[in-house]
Image: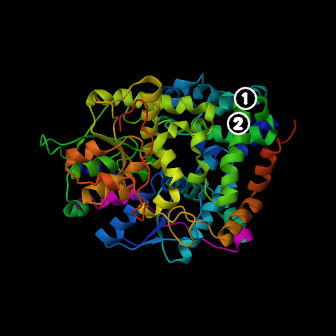
Amino acid sequence: MGNLIDLIRSDARYEDSLKACMNCGICTAICPAAEFYDYDPRRICDTVQRGDEEQVEKLLREDTIWYCGQCMSCKPRCPRGNVPGAVINILRKVSQEMGYYKESRMGRQQVALMAGIGNNILEIGYCVHPDKVRPEMHPEQGPAWEWYIKNIKEVAPKFGANYHGKGAGALREICPETMEELRNIFKVTGGMDFHDAILNGGKDD
Amino acid sequence: MANRYWNEYQKNIADDHYYYERSCIRQTFFPGSETAFLKMMQDELGKDIFDDFRLHTCTGIGYHTDVVPLETTMTVVARIFSLMKERGYENLVPSCITSFGVFTEMCHMWQEHPELLEQTRENLYKACKREFDMPKNIAHPSDLIFKYRFELAEKMKYRLVNRFTGKPLNVVEHIGCHYAKLFPDKGVGKAEFPYVLAGMIEAWGGHVVDYPERRHCCGFGFRQYLVQENRGYSVSNTKKKLESMEPYEPDFIVSNCPGCSMFLDRWQYTIAEMEHKTYDREGYGIPVLTYEEMAGLLLGYDPWELGLQIHQVQSERLLDKIGIPYDPKQKYNSASGKILRAPEKPENLLV
């Protein structure tokens, strides 16, 4: 086996995600991403299962693996108990570790996601927060959202929220001790190195 | 015989003493729903549920956008379990469907791979000097409302019935994908017959609409929404659902996932503005409620304290059908009663 196949199969999720694909294609039939993009989870599982290093490397450098929406509708449908959506998680991880994600348009979006969601977690302790859903970046949120953001300090308490307050409650400021522990977890488990690597352009080939 | 088979589709939901974990998405878009849920559990049902200020994100959105590694998410989850242990609780109630899926997945992996559990224990101790146990029970808040739906019904002032026709309201229920598609045996009714919301609707007098795309994803897609240029994926999937449910003339949609509730609401506005198309007859759109909002309204909670005014599809016509009173003057007031200028009106969607 080559390095990429070894890396993929060494992921703890692999055993549960790809047992023995028989190429029936029900994952593709149910897949919302396959309806919208030129995307075929059946072919991805087949490529990974065959273990052809060259084909897998090609896959890791392409847009394809970034099309999945992680709904996991494939999981309960697969007659063999495979999880194509989790195979995607493994492929994306390896693509980022190898720096291949930079070669595809969709892959490069990881930089924006890290600068958004990744930074949110490390800076404020939440993945999403109203302060980060700016109306000018989210026209689809509509005028009701714009009104809420404009008046959030005065309106949020009406809903029982504790906007930027101390103590418990929705939208509370997360205390410094908690943030320190959260960041320590990222440091100890490799999350911080991964965060910095993606924001700094990742590993070169 | 039928009951015996149906019993296999039920899940074990703890009776009391819950540790509540708030949701990044729900608190952002539906803070009134979390408040209403705690009020129902504590005031209406007399249950012990703890809201801990020391919690933080489960990293679920980061995990599914592949910007947070598995080992990191596992250890973050372990810290949450550690806090729960420290507070003396064993039953976890995560507000978010993504968190529910993440907690379930991590526990599953630890059970299947004990070496990962050991590694996580080491990581957590190294990072935080903490120890943890896995929860005895993980239930989504919608599981708890489902479990106690008949007790809540006894306290409700209103039913899901059109007061003008006397007929049950047509309700579309949407289950978040990560509720039962990830681990089917962790959801009421499993992935095939999800009953957690349908059970509430039926118990409270409504009619559950069955339509072809009932189980299709709302289209969040994590990176497919969060990256602006990919949002066509997200709106297309919601549009597919809306087109499929339109002929059944739903009075409203209810969802147990914070993301789904928001997308099914906002994409109706987007489609109305882009294509001049709404999925009701009058041009107002189909109101979308969280299950806490649905339960809260029937219990007589104030619609404006639940936060219905920060949905884009407005709900007054639904409130009128049920017979729920509301004060239009209070709708856009601040918490202190100050009159705030109302939002702009959309160009096409009626409000």
Q: Which residue is mark 2?
A: A109
- Please give left or right for residue B268 compared with residue B294 in the image: right
Which residue is drawn at the image coordinates 26% and 51% (left, top)?
B4
Colour scheme in the image? rainbow
Q: Quadrant of residue B111?
A: bottom right
Q: Chain of mark 1?
A: A
Q: Relative to residue B12, is residue B323 depicted above or below?
A: above
Number of numbered tags placed on the structure image: 2
The alpha-carbon separation of the residues under discs 1 and 2 comes to 7 Å
Asked whether the residues under the numbered discs 1 and 2 touch, taking CB atoms below 8 Å apart as contact, a structural biologist would say yes
Residue B156 in picture, x, y percent from top left: 22, 60
Q: Specify the amino acid type for callout 2.
A: Gln
- Please give left or right for residue A150 compared with residue B79 in the image: left
**Residue B69 seen in the figure:** no
Quadrant (top left, top right, bottom left, bottom right) of the N terminus of chain A: top right
Q: Chain of mark 2?
A: A
Q: Relative to residue B306, is residue B279 depicted above or below?
A: above
Which residue is drawn at the image coordinates 59% and 53% (left, top)?
A131
